[in-house]
Amino acid sequence: MSRKRIRDIRNEELIEATIVAVHKRGYGVVTMAEIAREAGASAASINYYFGSKEGLMEATMLHLLGKLRRAMSEGYATARTPRERLYAVMDANFADGLFTVPQCSIWMQFWANAPYSPRLSRLHRINRARVRSHFLAELRALLPADRVETARQALQCYMDGVWLQAAQSEDALDPDEARAAAHRVVDLVIP
Amino acid sequence: MSRKRIRDIRNEELIEATIVAVHKRGYGVVTMAEIAREAGASAASINYYFGSKEGLMEATMLHLLGKLRRAMSEGYATARTPRERLYAVMDANFADGLFTVPQCSIWMQFWANAPYSPRLSRLHRINRARVRSHFLAELRALLPADRVETARQALQCYMDGVWLQAAQSEDALDPDEARAAAHRVVDLVIP
DNA sequence: GAAACTTGAATGACCGTTTAAAAAACTGTT
DNA sequence: AACAGTTTTTTAAACGGTCATTCAAGTTTC
């Protein structure tokens, strides 16, 4: 029990440090030593816990995906109508704890590096497919069949595009405004 | 004259090689030697022409931005109505010579690395502002003022999102279909 | 013959990972 | 509480390797 606890605490700390360090320096450039310094540890101990740099990156990605998945489940629980559930999918992506510059930034980094890492690209495919099926399920209840796919593309690509833009932002983001804008886009696409 | 000619030819060759090599290996990982091999030259000669790796990357980005700008100007020339010009902006982004996996891929790479390179981030800001003003100009003629900004966000983020997704694609893209889909999205947003 | 171009080899720096040994945390016993 | 033994955790240092850039010495072009 206590054995497991310490390992989990260290994992969490190291992953948080990874998010900050990758945001500051970029995925391809950040070094183990920089991440270690951010966490107040040594590079060797990261390898002790995660085996390798790639293992650490995969774990970090997994951590972020989990966060996103949980945010979406929460929103889904209280939504009652298809449109509300559509809002919920958007709101999850722009939730307070997720829609921050460092996290959009690191998401961007993972995205750019996914094509070169089978582990990362697998995680991305899974996530994308999940979001896609959520969209489709709700859109089918709101639109004639021949418009569903176009609307899904418009909304899903919009979400990606907003993150992409947010990663370039110099100053803090406004999740509230992002959610409001997303709702307006939904209303524009589905009057 | 001839002095300038040789330099231009080499520049072009090296930039094309850079696009291929960065696509294959990723911005952060690709080496000068790999790019040189792709071009049938030596790493030293790249430095002779571009000064440094960063100089080469900036030149490559500049090359791609020029291509995009020219594609957009061409489309604008023949479009007659605001809606046609809106289509033209989209079509430029999904033009046959631009909407290919290697180019979406490298665009993605530059995007991800822009926050860490003042030179790249400057180029990105300029490009984004240009696209934005094109969108606004046409949308103002098609929509009531209070919907213009929402529609612009929806369309511009859509474009970014499509590229982002295209960069992950395993097999060749279909620019025709991408343009058709973009038109459908425009029609969805502006009935 | 001069200027432009090319490159192999050298340079200097950096990084991920491993290793060995120490420190810390935990265990059961007295 | 104290202690000796065991396991877990930490890190400094060493290792092996890679890479961008420079430079000097060639080759080509004008």
Image (spheres, coloured by chain):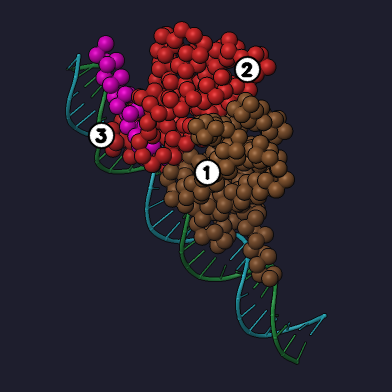
Chain colours: A brown, B red, C green, D cyan
A114 lies left or right of B190: left
Which of B38/D28 is in front? B38
Mark 3: give few (<14), some (14-19) or many (20+) Cα within 10 Å: few
Instruction: Give the CA separation, mark 3 to mark 2.
Output: 50 Å
Where residue B129 appears, x then y in whole percent? 55, 19
- Amino acid type, callout 3: Gly
Q: Earlier in the sequence, mark 3 or mark 2?
A: 3
Amino acid type for the residue under numbered disc 2: Val
The residue most toward the front is A144
Viewer-proximal residue among A156 and B95? A156
Residue numbers of the magenta segment: B1-26
Give the dominant element type of the magenta stretch: helix, strand or loop. Answer: helix
Secondary structure, mark 2, is helix
Residue A11 image position (x, y, % from top left): 62, 58
Cβ–Cβ under 8 Å for marks 1 and 2: no
Q: Quadrant of the C terminus of chain B?
A: top right
Residue named by callout 3: B40
Q: Residues within 10 Å of mark 1 (few under 14, many from 20)?
A: few
Chain of the residue under the numbered disc 2 shown in the image:
B
Q: Determine the secondary structure under disc 1.
A: helix
Foreground pick, A137 / B137: A137
Front position among marks 3 and 2 = 2
The answer to whether residue A30 is above or below residue B114 is: below
| Residue at the spot of label 2 | B148
Query: How far is mark 1 from mark 2, CA to CA?
Result: 29 Å
Q: Amino acid at mark 1?
A: Arg
Tell if the residue under mark 1 belongs to the same chain as the one under mark 3.
no
